[in-house]
Every structure is written in C-alpha cells, then in structure tokens.
Amino acid sequence: MACVDRCRCCMDSRRQSSILYNILKSEEQQQQAGSGESAPQQPGPEGHATMGLGCSCGSQRRVALKSPQVACKAASAVLVKTLRFVKNVPCFQELPLDEQLVLVRSCWAPLLVLGLAQDRVHFETVETTEPSMLHRILTNKGRGSDDEDELSLLLLRKTPKLLGPPPQPCGSSSPKLPLVGEIQAIKGFLAKCWSLDISTKEYAYLKGTVLFNPELPGLHCVQYIQGLQQEAQQALNEHVRLIHRGDQARFAKLNVALSMLRSINASVIAELFFRPIIGAVNMDDMLLEMLCAKL
C-alpha cells in the first residue's frame, strides 16, 4: 500500500510540475480570482493538503552544497590529513608504489568520509532544479543558433554561482550532481559514527581496516595486505574489550558502521566536495601527486 501511495505521489508531482498543467492552473486561478473564489487545495496521498510541495519520494532529486566554500575547504583539509595518515603508516611505506596507488585509489573516498566523521564536519545541501524534457521542447522550438546561444548564457546566469565555472572536459562523462539518496547515505554514516562516539584509536583501526583491502584487483602482495587488515581488526577488538568492557556489542557496532561505507560512491564524493572548487579533476592524478608530495 505504501508503494502505491509513493507511486501516486510521484505521478501527482509530475503532473503538477508540468508546463501544461501550470498554464491551465494559472488560468483557472485567474478566473477564480475574478469571481472572488479561492482555489481549493489538492489533497495529498494521505489526505493532507499539498501546497506546492515536491514529491515525498525525493531521493532521486539532485542536490548541491549549500555553502561549498566552507564544506569543500573542510573536505580538502580532511583529504590532506588522510593522505598524511596513510603515508605515515610504516606497513604502507613498505609496499611498492604501484601497490600503494591501488590501495589509495580504491579507499580514498571511504577514508575521507571517516575523516569527516572524526573531525565532525557538518554540511548542508540544497535541491537543484533541472528543466524537464517538455520544457526543453517548448522553449527550443523554432529557435535559431543565436537564440540557443543566448538561452545557454541565460541558463548559466541562473545557475548558482556556488557551483563555480563550467567544468572543462577531462575524458569523463558530463558532471551529475549527487542525488538526495546518495547524500542521505553519507549523512547516515556520519550520524552513526557520532552516535557511537568513536575514539581516535578506534578511528585509526577502522582506517587501517579500510586501507588494507586484499580483495582489490591489481594487487600482488595480497597475503601481506590481508594480514595487515586482520591485524587492524584484532587491534580494534582488543582495544574495545579493554576500554568498553560493559559493551560487548561495540566491536560489532563499529563494523556495522564500517559496512555502511560500501553504499557511498567515490564519484559522489568527488562531485560533491571537489568539483565545485577545482572543476573536473582526475582524482587518480591528484592522489598520485599528493602521495608523492611531502604533506
């Protein structure tokens, strides 16, 4: 029944946001205003009146940072600290450079999110609107090339300045702002970590577990890396038993929180925290440069 309500809600939202519907609705409201009548409110799927609100099934809507200057600066600082932490792990330094790159390229995003949790970085997002297919058809019909250029400039002016200049092509597909559901996954993980009040040592052991992932393709020192991951887990377990003797389930809770990182996409992190300030950047190249630099 809930699924049916959500589908009905989505259909109502699409109908009410269409151009033709808005035109007809506007004419109806003008007629009612002339006759002194008030426009009736549309009932929602649960019987509640909807006042132009969007669909409650909004996890597919795209969002951007509300204050990118602040959030991106904080994320950049966390990335530098994360790479510094990784480079200072003695066992990591003993690995060949190509092995180090494989590990860093695959785990930089979850390590960054762990760093955001450790530093208690808060960020807010705002929904962005994209023109519908019908809007493009109606507004582009009969336009010449000059009009199309003018329209493009107009859209660029209407685009929030917080997003920065249009990204330059770098061999990847056009940028896609993160979805609401993807941001909810990140914030859900942060909230989980903050509710557990994870200590500095626990964060370090969790980072070691994430960093030394033996299941990555392209690794040659698989057994060595697997042993490092097991050592990190063992050290975490021993620390929890020593410090949190009354909470026998804490070790499991920490690993459950760690498993939530699997639903967080690295491209989402790059689009959210780094594209607004540095444009379309190749994260692999940047990570290599940072890995070889003195941080």
Image (cartoon, helix red, strand yellow):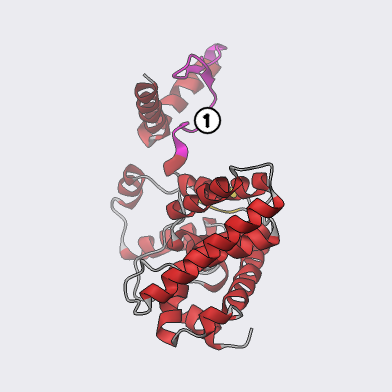
Residue drawn at the location 32% of the way across and 65% of the way down: 145
Image coordinates for residue 218, horizontal then vertical, percent:
32, 76
Q: Is residue 290 found left or right of 139 in the rendered image?
A: right
> What amino acid type is highlighted by mark number 1?
Leu
Does residue 27 belong to the magenta stretch? Answer: no
Task: Give the magenta-colored segment's residue range.
Answer: 34-58
Quadrant in which the N terminus is drawn: top left
Q: Nearer the viewer, residue 184 or 178?
A: 184
Q: Nearer the viewer, residue 192 or 46?
A: 192
Residue drawn at the location 55% of the way across and 11% of the way down: 37
* Type of secondary structure dominating the magenta stretch: loop
Image coordinates for residue 64, horizontal then vertical, percent:
54, 54
Image coordinates for residue 234, horizontal then vertical, percent:
54, 61
Q: Is residue 117 found left or right of 11 in the rendered image?
A: right
Q: 13 above or below 130?
A: above
Q: Secondary structure at mark 1?
A: loop
In the picture of the structure, the residue carrying the numbered disc 1 is 53
